[in-house]
Image (tube, rainbow, N blue to C red):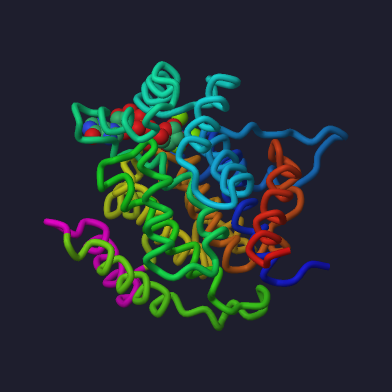
Amino acid sequence: QVSQLANKFRGTLIGALLGDCLGAPFEGDFVVTKSVLTNYVTKLQVETGSVLQMYSYTDDTAMTKSVAESLLECKGFDAKDMAKRFTFEYEQQPKRGYGANVVDVFSALKLTDFEDPFAPAKAQFKGLGSYGNGSAMRISPVALFGYNMPFDQLCDLTKNCSLLTHTNRGGYNGAILQCLAIHQALHTNITDINEAAKFNSKEFLNSLIDSMTKVEKDETSQPFTDKLLSMKKVIEEEKELGALDIAYLFGHGVAAINSVPTAIYIFLRAQKPLQEYETDNVFVRTLYLSISVGGDTDTIASMACSLTGALYGATEIPEILIKRCEVNEEIMKLADNLYAAVMGK
Ligand code: R7I
Ligand code: MG
Ligand code: MG
Ligand code: MG
């Protein structure tokens, strides 16, 4: 029996793993029809035959592991160490579905012997830097490691971890939004699923808007804040968007601006029953909705399920879903080690 906070730490990383592994088979599909998805999600939850079908993780988890391991080993952010772990992991297993351009960063890091670990990322996209969601998709360990950090310190740590590959503000601010959302879910005091009715989506979103307003205040435009504000309208009007509406309004692509707000909306929407798929389990609803929007399904599911995990903890995740994911034991251990590090044990 672990404490509820330790359980929430586990839920955060296991949620991220689960969304990645179970969302990945649909990555790139534009529309996932209700019949296909209902069949898939239903089958995942029942044990048939003697051998459980397992699912592989992708780059989302590969990089998340590196972030967690680096923070633990170095007891904080060490740019060179983290850059080396990303690159080594990629070299060991290059076919994990990495973003088309981020692989050039790994090559350049290696070629320059990690001399300036921030330099290769700056050269991406003719010097504009990547706005892909690759920094947001791997940020969950930072929200855990920074559990007790003040706001500015947490944002700085997130930005530093992002800048190793994503120097466009669309990239690192997306990571900051995802990190702040997880951090807020961790600090939301819900002891278990029976207290789900206590969770207030509007309050959650309002305080996220306050945070993101601070983050984007000195920028020329506030794209993430603006998306959260349109989300606020949707939630206040109690509209329950379907998959196509979600994809249309918030996006489902590899840019952080088109996937981080989407994951946050799905996390909030999944608090209530779905018309499309009947289940009492909030994780299953999060997973179902994430895949239903199509596009970058592994990454959107990973970010959304991580939020659900941070709020309710790992004990609310159906065990059979966890068992289907590659490296689930390793990820559980990383969550426990991050918890111990934060508690000073
Ligand atoms: O962001 P990144 O690590 O990719 C993560 C995604 C996730 O869905 C993973 O599951 C994996 O499938 O990939 O990798 P990047 O290569 O930096 O960015 C991803 C893509 O976003 C690029 O290949 C480009 O198509 C696009 N992109 C940009 N396009 C134009 N201009 C990112 N930044 C730019 C840009 O500045
Ligand atoms: Mg992936
Ligand atoms: Mg891919
Ligand atoms: Mg993806």
Horizontally, residue 328 falls left or right of residue 141, namely right
Please give the name of the residue rendered at 39% of the width and 77% of the height, measured from the top-left corner.
Answer: 202
Residue 259, horizontal then vertical, whole percent: 36, 48
Q: Hey, which residue is sitting farthest right in the picture? A: 50
Q: Quadrant of residue 96?
A: top right
SS assignment for the magenta stretch, majority: helix
In the image, residue 313 above or below residue 115: below
Q: Report whether residue 251 is seen.
A: yes
**Per the image, is 221 magenta?**
yes
Horizontally, residue 78 falls left or right of residue 130, namely right
The quarter of the rendering in which ligand 3 is drawn is top left
Q: Please state the total of marks drawn on the protein image.
A: 0
Q: In which quarter of the image is residue 114?
A: top left
Please give the name of the residue rendered at 51% of the width and 38% of the height, measured from the top-left corner.
Answer: 82
Residue 18, horizontal then vertical, whole percent: 62, 46
In the image, residue 308 above or below residue 328: below
Query: For this rendering, which residue is in front, 200 or 118?
Result: 118
**Per the image, is 56 magenta?**
no
Query: For this rendering, which residue is in front, 8 or 197?
Result: 8
Residue 151, horizontal then vertical, whole percent: 40, 69
Query: For this rendering, which residue is in front, 84 or 298?
Result: 84
Q: Hey, which residue is sitting farthest left in the picture? A: 220
Please give the name of the residue rendered at 38% of the width and 26% of the height, measured from the top-left corner.
Answer: 105
- Which quarter shows the N terminus? bottom right
- Which quarter shows the C terminus? bottom right
Region of the chain picked out in magenta, as a range: 219-239
Q: Report whether residue 37 is seen.
A: no
Query: For this rendering, which residue is in front, 31 or 205?
Result: 205
